[in-house]
């Protein structure tokens, strides 16, 4: 594992800072004076990459002209490497260009963060084994918990790209059709079992029109974000048979504001868990393609302190994003720059390691107690949910930037 | 019902021509000399709308600058009406501008048709009752044929926008994981049960960020296309539990090349079928929102004549596109200009009225005999499938333009 690479931006040199020079995550920001543009986080600052190209300090054919990283992602992996190398040199302690760059630094506290990329399409997988077993047990009983296909293919469904929002965007409790097991007929009402899902999202950088091998899929991935796939469990229970989740997952999906590149995570690669059943050749592991990333979920009731609800790690996934993408393309499905693949909920094996309230409260039967004595089965209006992610290196941390959302009451409706 | 509106483009005045002045469907075309651009079909010709705006004959703020109708759709319904009125006046028999327009007509036989709009996201519904009962009977048995939610909400799933192609694009047989009921383990192989689905697609013109009423949803729809949702039944059977169809529907979805506007279909509105169970208020019918459109499926084996496989009508749908869109937005899901909503497979009650081979061959057990004596359970390489749609008025026809696709062999793979 490499060590901290020191920067002339002093705040980036702390062992616990999420944005050391080893990270260099990509986002989109605006300030009171400047409109939205591409930037790179370094310590407590953001380096304005659009300004950097306008000043001729870097040159990527105008890829930063729009406030999104899609154009840059579309340039391909050789250019991804070149930008990272150039930024590393420019920002390193040994750089002679600190004075040239300083005017293009903006303090993060003065910046508003926006969606870092345009989501082409959003797919959500179901690759956490503990989560699949837990939910399967609750919905279908212990004997049918893991669907027969689950150990053979990374099960997933197409989500709704239009509903993906950046951290900090409030989320209104959705309306939907609800029908409890003892209700005679359904009713249309605000969701009563609104939940989070702790996930990591992989971003496709390189488009493709043909099936990808696992290695090709890994190479096509640009980076990762934290992802909270807000889920209306009562809407889901009524709608999901036979075509899968639809409106239960369409209100919002929140992502963290910084794209942590695959390059920044390179030293944290780990293997998927041992296989109970061998995968078919086209999905077989060809190297370590998960990452050792510590994850946490916390909840703050309105105006109150935060309680940490759970801790887990990306290693709990049974399939890597590369395997998911290989499967996703197997039918010939064209993949595009900006496609977002959610990992599926990541849960450890213990209650304090679960990635959703559905699991923590075991379907609402075992309320979770917060630090202030309040309890939760599902989310209440005013609750603020925060996901965090950290890969811990030798004297440095690769952070993701928090993935935050506050629940607002359902909109009023007339009908 | 109105009568034929006569045009100075003589070919448009035939009672059976699909593109009379009453229709004016919107497409994107190119010729040997001209790059792709927006056009309107009239009789055997296409009126070059981009050239029309460049010549100052119509003025829509440059909405035709790109080879897609999305920019125009985003202008909103008042502009949709204005263009239709202006084109109707310009092309009517009484127009004094025939000589001005003639240089902007291109013969359809010299034109290549392209995707008429950029699909923002693709959603596929399941609103044909006969189809739902047929498939449910085959997959889950007669007693569980119609899922409990089916009479209460228009069941749908998110599809894959990147896989939507225009009529004429060949479709390679997909690979996928297959596991028959008697197989011990799955295998990765070309699909053996490749099928069509006869559908109508509704195109969202007006974006929204909040739930829509059924009336608002109807107003947001710009137009309709024929839609063939190619389906790999063996991949589907193995993958669809518990999160719905995924790779089985991701190879391709073919649409007809001309957007038939809601305005052109206005005189063909019909009611949805009687309700067995009352819908909740937010989904209730508020007027006739289906259309009386005759539909047909035909199949031509490679180098052979076409056999008509089935005839049906859009009236077989249980939910209108407006009801589907109202449901789609009910969770707060943002809808965007260019969203495409597939109706679900449209089947009549008899075998020769079914909209898929899965139903016609009853799961492959009852082969369909073609006119040349060959039989089919599912599609063979080289087969060309054609969907047609016609609304029949008093002395005129509103046609859709054929929705055609030819099956090519699966790609070769190494693994």
Image (cartoon, coloured by chain):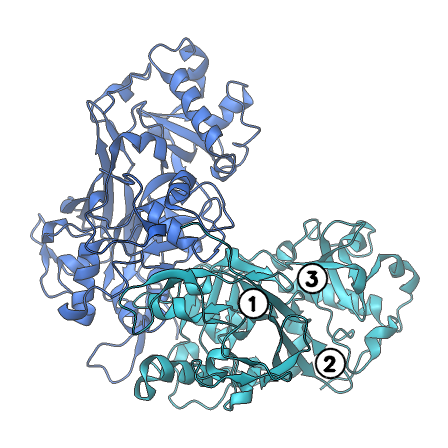
Chain colours: A cyan, B blue
User: Of B52 and A383, which appears nearest the observer?
Assistant: A383
Q: Position of residue A9 (x, y in %)?
A: 86, 70
Provide the chain ID for the residue under circle 2. A
Label 1 element class? loop
- Closer to the chain start, of discs 2 and 3, is 3
Residue B390: quadrant of the picture: top left
Q: Chain of mark 1?
A: A
Within 10 Å of disc 1 (Cα), the crowding (few <14, some 14-19, many 20+) is some
In front: mark 1 or mark 2? 1
Q: Report if the CB atoms under discs 2 and 3 are less than 8 Å apart.
A: no
What residue is at 54 percent from the left and 74 percent from the top? A199
Residue A27's disc is 3
Q: Which residue is mark 1?
A: A381
**Residue A397 numbered mark, or none:** 2
Regarding residue B379, the answer to whether it shows in the image is: no
In the depicted structure, whether residue B16 falls above or below residue B115: above
- The CA span between labels 1 and 2 is 33 Å
């Amino acid at each position: 594992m490499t060590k901290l690479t020191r920067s002339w931006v002093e705040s980036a040199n702390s062992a616990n800072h999420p944005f050391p020079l080893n990270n260099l995550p990509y986002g989109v920001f605006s300030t009171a004076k400047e409109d939205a543009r591409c930037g790179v986080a370094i310590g407590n600052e953001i380096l304005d990459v659009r300004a950097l190209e306008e000043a001729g300090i870097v040159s990527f054919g105008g890829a930063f002209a729009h406030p999104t990283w899609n154009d840059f992602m579309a340039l391909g992996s050789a250019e991804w490497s070149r930008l990272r190398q150039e930024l590393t040199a420019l920002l390193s302690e040994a750089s002679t260009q600190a004075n040239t760059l300083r005017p293009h630094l903006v303090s993060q506290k003065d910046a508003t963060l926006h969606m870092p990329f345009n989501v082409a399409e959003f797919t959500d997988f179901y690759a956490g084994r503990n989560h699949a077993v837990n939910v399967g047990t609750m919905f279908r009983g212990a004997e049918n918990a893991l669907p027969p296909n689950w150990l053979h293919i990374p099960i997933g469904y197409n989500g709704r790209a239009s509903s993906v929002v950046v951290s900090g965007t409030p989320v209104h409790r959705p309306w939907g059709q609800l029908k409890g097991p003892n209700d005679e007929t359904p009713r249309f009402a605000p969701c009563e079992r609104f939940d989070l899902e702790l996930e990591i999202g992989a971003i496709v950088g390189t488009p493709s029109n043909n099936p990808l091998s696992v290695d090709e899929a890994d190479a096509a991935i640009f980076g990762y974000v934290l992802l909270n796939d807000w889920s209306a469990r009562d809407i889901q229970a009524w709608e999901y048979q036979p075509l899968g989740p639809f409106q239960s997952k369409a209100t919002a999906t929140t992502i963290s504001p910084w794209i942590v590149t695959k390059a920044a995570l390179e030293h944290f690669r780990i293997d998927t868990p041992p296989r109970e059943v061998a995968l078919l050749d086209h999905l077989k592991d060809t190297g370590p393609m998960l990452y050792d990333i510590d994850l946490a979920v916390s909840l703050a009731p309105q105006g109150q302190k935060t309680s940490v609800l759970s801790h887990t790690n990306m290693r709990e996934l049974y399939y890597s994003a590369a395997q998911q993408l290989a499967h996703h393309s197997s039918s010939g499905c064209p993949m595009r720059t900006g496609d977002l693949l959610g990992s599926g909920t990541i849960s450890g094996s213990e209650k304090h390691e679960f990635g959703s309230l559905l699991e923590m409260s075991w379907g609402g039967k075992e309320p979770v107690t917060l630090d202030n004595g309040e309890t939760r089965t599902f989310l209440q209006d005013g609750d603020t949910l925060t996901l965090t992610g950290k890969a811990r290196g030798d004297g440095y941390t690769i952070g993701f930037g928090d993935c935050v959302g506050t629940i607002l009451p359902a909109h009023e409706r007339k009908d």
